[in-house]
Structure formats: C-alpha cells, structure tokens
C-alpha cells in the first residue's frame, strides 16, 4: 500500500468537506471576490485548515480512526452550519463572545425558528456519503502508519497553510493587525482559520487588562480628550430638566415619510420631525451587541467592541457613564424595558453604569394577550411605564427601550395599521407593519407625557438602535427604495437611523450634519448645561461648531460630509459614484486609530486609572 492510499480515508473526508465549505461560502455567505487572487483564497482557505485538522486523527489507534473521522467531520459541519444560521440574520460570523451570549437564544425562539429550514438537512448529506464510502475497502483507515508518514502529513498541512497565509498577506497587507471588518477576515482566512484566530484574540484581550498600567491609560485617555466649543444658544438650555431617551427598536431612517398605498408608515415620527431637531444623516455604530451596543455608545461615548457585546464581555469595568455624571448633578436615573432583566446582561451592566433603578419585565403585568415575540408589546409597555415615570424623583434621566419592532416582525392582525409591503420577502414585507405599530405606541406615549405635565419639563430624545433589515435582503430593499440594486454605498446609507431631540420651547429643525450614536453623550450633557470635556473620549456635541463630521462605523466604514468609505472604496455623496481613494485617505488612518484606541480603553479597563475629580 502506498503512502497516499494509506491516507485515503482522511483525504476523502478532507475533499468532501473542502468542496462543501467552498460551495457554502458561495451560496450561503455573501463573500464577493473582487479579483482573481481573492477567488483563489476563497477556494483554498478551507483546505489549509482541514489538512492540519485531520492530522489529529493519527493520535488515535487504527481501529478508532473511522469513527474519529466521522466525529470530526460532524463537528466541522455543525460549526459551519451554525455560522450559516447566524449569518442569515446578522450577516456576520460567530465569535467566542457571541457563543457565551447564547443564553439569550432561549428568549429569541421566534427568530431562530424563522432562520432554520428543513432543507438545511442538505448541509449534512456529505456525511452520509462519507459514512458509506468509509465502509468500502478502498477507503479503509485501520492500517498502521509509520510516524515518518504522519509527520509528512502534518508537513503537507503546514505547507498549504504557509501558501495560504502568504497569499492572504499579499492580497491584504497587515491583515491580522489592522482589520476590523470580519467579512474581510473570513474572506481571507476562511471560516475555520478565522475561528482559530478568534480564539487567539480572545486570549489576548483577556490578558490586556492584567497588563494595562497607569502610563498606557494616561497616554490614551489624554490623547482622546477633545475640547469642543459649546453652542452658546443651546448650552444649558435644558438645565435641570428631565431627560427621557427612547430607543426605537430596529428602526432605520428610510421608513420616515414612506407610504404604502398612500398610507404613511410613520405618521407620528413624521410629525415629530417638525417639532424637534431631526438629524437626517445620523448613523448607528453598533456591532454584535445590537441594542446593548447602542445603549453603550449613548451612555459612554465609547465604541462597542469588534467581537461580542461589551455588556456581556466587560460589565465590571469602570465607566464614566451618563447616569454617574448626572448623579453628581442631582439626577435620578432609570431604565424601562419589557423583557427579562438578564437579557444582554443588562441587570449587571446597569449597576456598573450607575443606574438607580431598572424597571424590567417583572415590574409589568405581562399576559399572553399583551406580549408578542420578545416580550411586552410597546403600547402596554408605555401605558404601564407612565405611572412609574411620574413617581420618579425629579430631575430624572429615564431610558425607554422599545421591543415590538424586532425580527421576525410579528404583529396581530387587528394592530396591523398599514398593509405589509408587497414583496416576496416576508421579513421586509412585515417590517413596515411593526414599524407602524411602534409609531402609534410612541404617539400614545407622547400624549401621556403631555397629559402628565412631564413633557414641558423634559428633553425627549428618540433614536433608532440599529438596522432592522440585514444585507441579505438587498433584492427586496432595492424594490423598496426604487433602485436597480443596493451598492456598498447604499448599504452604508441604510445604516442611517432616525434621531430626534425635542427641547421644550424650541422649534423644529432638520439638521443635515453627519453624526452617530457616539455623539449623543456630549450633545445631551451640553443641553443640560454640563461640561462634557473630561468625560468624553470620542464623539462631539452635534450642535457645536466644532462638531467633526466624521462618523465611523464599527466595521471601519465611515461617513464624512462629502464621502462614504466602505469595502476599501471611496464614494462621493450624494449619488455614490466611486472616486479616487485619495479623497478618503485623510480619514482612513484616523478611523482605524479611533476604533483601536476605544478597544484598548475597554480591554485594558483604562478608565479605572482616571483620577476621580
Ligand atoms: C432585547 C431587545 C432586543 O431585550 O433589546 O435586542 P436586540 O436583538 O435588538 O439586540
Ligand atoms: Mn434592538
């Protein structure tokens, strides 16, 4: 028997899984290869993992090899499939911190149900073929293999890996040190090598806190201490007033002023735009932590993490959050949310950030009729919150987190006040109906605020937490937006979320300035007359003449007043034609540095070194 045929069983398993992974990367993930080298990388990257992976088979005795091969093939296929399901909703790949968030999965039964299909059994059909073939004499694996041949096998694996890494580095220099975009990493490394890299990152970030010291902290914190001129007309305009901030679940900006059969999808938000400062070029900057990331941005003016939800991974760090700052100014602070308190680890994180009270699901009357999907419906949520809100010591900072407009966008027929959008994509079609419901809930909340007298005494802020329609719905979205296709430029524009700031006594105004959730903290503190300078690292007051129109998204894309940078391409606004990269170059390094420094602050828990004033 030659050496090659001795390895036949393993070669067979490698070949089947290699082909499957390549097909899955083409069919189930959107990983466009922009040029030939990228296509080659996509093709060989499963192989460089598989050869080394299967070399572990030789650690087992010959008689066990067949079942070890089967188990390894099954584990590999299962991880691949888990990525497929995760990708269907998040257009993203699994990371270690996300796996630790899995306790949330129990609460999102409906979403998971929508994302798993019976036809998915096809993802495992190669395993049946493998099991049958391994029984045939040609593929038997129970003969002895000399250690020289085993070493040779590992050497093959290392050689393929080396070729792969060299090609990846040619394709994208500094791939592992300067890339925030997971899609690029997976495209270059392959799903499984990416997972190994992720494990390495995980150990590195866990070490970072232990290694951080006062000097690093001083340097980073000092470097990112910006002074912005206050807007003399607005600084302190709401001194001593309550601050009510409403998080609009999954609401993107494109739904505003949108009509279906002549019926407005957001009649109330459209009205609100006339009586508030409405920001029309404002972006969410969230990552894998979705709603919780938006809360983190708002309260801390720090970027969420590139992997996992910071609420879950770093809930015991020191933060200089809005509730803490407001407490020293005599404020009481509370969060209201009709879901269980441990979702996104909120109960722990809210204590860390200095909230006095968290009105979670247990504070509400929750019945089968008044819940849908994740929890209490928005209308009863607001109705039942009002009595608590009225009782809060004033001035207060209250955050209300809405919930009904959440994937998979379910609403009872009698509360469906707009027709589903006529398109052959259930998610996009239903989305409009739950947005319409949320809009009505908000109208009722505002009416109650007015009736209770709180409205005249409060700054009310309403913002969208993150996108609701992921990238994989681009065909339906092109239809919704009346475009031939959704380009990478449009994809960034679709990350716009609405922002309204209602200040008692001020007229409405449309603000075209570019901004993001990172700017909320300095903006709101300034309205309340609180100097934000020492407590803000990133983001600037949206009303200040020094506000910098550079909004950096978590994947490293960014938006300026004139350009959008994404997918390594610079596009000019407002039509999105690609232009010479030199137009975006001045900001490219800045964007990376800012994300990197924010990550270092969190991984190193650097704010603990800040002197308490
Ligand atoms: C869960 C709610 C939804 O309580 O905030 O979370 P999301 O999935 O949007 O992050
Ligand atoms: Mn959300």
Image (spheres, helix red, strand yellow):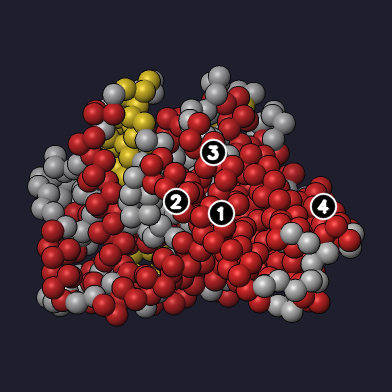
Q: Secondary structure at mark 3?
A: helix
Task: Find residue 357 and report its image quarter.
Answer: bottom left
Which residue occupies the foreground of this view, 260 or 159? Answer: 159
Query: Which residue appears at 13% of the width and 54% of the height?
Result: 226
Q: CA distance from mark 4 to mark 1?
A: 23 Å
Q: CA distance from mark 3 to mark 1?
A: 12 Å
Q: Secondary structure at mark 4?
A: helix
Which residue occupies the foreground of this view, 233 or 129? Answer: 129
Residue that numbered label 3 is attached to? 40
Mark 4 close to ligand 1, CB under 8 Å: no
Disc 1 crowd, CA 10 A, few/some/many (<14, 14-19, 20+):
many
Q: CA distance from mark 3 to mark 2?
A: 12 Å
Residue 165: which numbered mark, if any?
2
Sequence-wise first label, 3 or 1: 3
- Do tag 2 and tag 1 residues touch (Cβ < 8 Å)? yes
Residue that numbered label 1 is attached to? 48
Task: Find residue 599 and report its image quarter.
Answer: bottom left
Query: Which residue appears at 17% of the width and 70% of the height?
Result: 216
Quarter of the C terminus within the rendering: bottom left
């Amino acid at each position: 028997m030659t050496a090659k045929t001795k390895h036949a069983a393993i070669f067979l398993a490698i070949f089947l899984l290699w082909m499957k992974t390549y097909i899955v990367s083409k069919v189930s993930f959107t990983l466009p290869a922009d040029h030939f080298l990228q296509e080659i990388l996509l093709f060989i990257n499963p192989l460089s993992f598989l050869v080394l992976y299967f070399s572990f088979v030789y650690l087992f005795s010959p008689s066990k090899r067949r079942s070890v091969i089967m188990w390894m093939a099954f584990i590999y296929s299962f991880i691949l499939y888990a990525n497929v399901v995760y990708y269907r909703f998040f257009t993203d790949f699994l990371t270690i911190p996300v796996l630790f968030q899995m306790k949330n999965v129990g609460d999102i039964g409906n979403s998971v149900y929508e994302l798993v299909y019976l036809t998915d059994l096809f993802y495992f059909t190669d395993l049946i073929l493998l099991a049958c073939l391994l029984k045939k004499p040609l593929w038997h694996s129970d003969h002895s293999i000399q250690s020289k041949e085993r070493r040779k096998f590992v050497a093959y694996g290392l050689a393929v890996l080396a070729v792969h890494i060299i090609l990846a580095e040619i394709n994208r220099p500094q791939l592992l040190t300067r890339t925030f975009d997971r899609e690029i990493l997976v495209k270059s490394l392959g799903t499984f090598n990416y997972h190994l890299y992720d494990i390495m990152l995980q150990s590195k970030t866990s070490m970072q806190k232990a290694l951080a010291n006062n000097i690093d902290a001083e340097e980073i914190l000092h470097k990112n201490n910006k002074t912005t001129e206050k807007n003399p007309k607005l600084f302190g305009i709401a001194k001593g007033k309550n601050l009510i901030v409403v998080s609009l679940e999954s609401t993107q900006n494109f739904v505003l002023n949108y009509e279906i059969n002549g019926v407005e999808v957001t009649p109330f938000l459209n009205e609100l735009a006339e009586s508030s400062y409405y920001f029309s070029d404002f972006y969410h900057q969230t990552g894998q932590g979705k709603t919780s990331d938006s809360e983190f941005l708002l309260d801390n003016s720090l970027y969420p993490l590139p992997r996992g939800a910071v609420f879950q991974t770093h809930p015991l760090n020191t933060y200089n959050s809005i509730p803490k700052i407001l407490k020293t100014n005599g404020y009481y602070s509370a969060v209201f949310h009709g879901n269980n308190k441990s979702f996104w680890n909120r109960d722990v994180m809210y204590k860390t950030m200095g909230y006095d009270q968290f009105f979670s699901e247990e504070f509400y009357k929750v019945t089968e009729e008044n819940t849908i999907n994740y929890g209490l419906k928005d209308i009863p949520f607001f109705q039942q919150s009002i009595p608590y809100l009225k009782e809060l010591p004033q001035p207060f900072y209250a955050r209300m987190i809405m919930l009904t407009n959440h994937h998979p966008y379910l609403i009872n027929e009698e509360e469906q006040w707009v027709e589903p959008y006529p398109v052959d994509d259930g998610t996009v079609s239903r989305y409009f109906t739950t947005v319409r419901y949320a809009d009505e809930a908000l109208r009722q909340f505002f009416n109650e605020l007015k009736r209770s007298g709180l409205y005249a005494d409060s700054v009310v802020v309403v913002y969208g937490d993150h996108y609701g329609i992921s990238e994989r719905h681009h065909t339906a979205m092109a239809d919704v937006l009346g475009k031939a296709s959704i380009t990478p430029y449009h994809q960034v524009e679709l990350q716009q979320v609405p922002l309204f700031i209602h200040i008692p006594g001020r007229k409405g105004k449309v603000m075209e300035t570019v901004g993001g959730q990172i700017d909320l903290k300095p903006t709101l503190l300034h309205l309340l007359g609180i100097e934000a300078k020492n407590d803000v690292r990133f983001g600037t007051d949206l009303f200040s003449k020094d506000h910098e129109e550079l909004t950096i998204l978590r994947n490293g894309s960014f938006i300026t007043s004139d350009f959008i940078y994404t997918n390594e391409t610079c596009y000019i606004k407002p039509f999105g034609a690609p232009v010479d990269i030199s137009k975006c170059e001045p900001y490219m390094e800045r964007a990376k540095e800012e994300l990197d420094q924010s990550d270092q602050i969190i991984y190193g828990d650097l704010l603990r070194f800040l002197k308490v004033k």
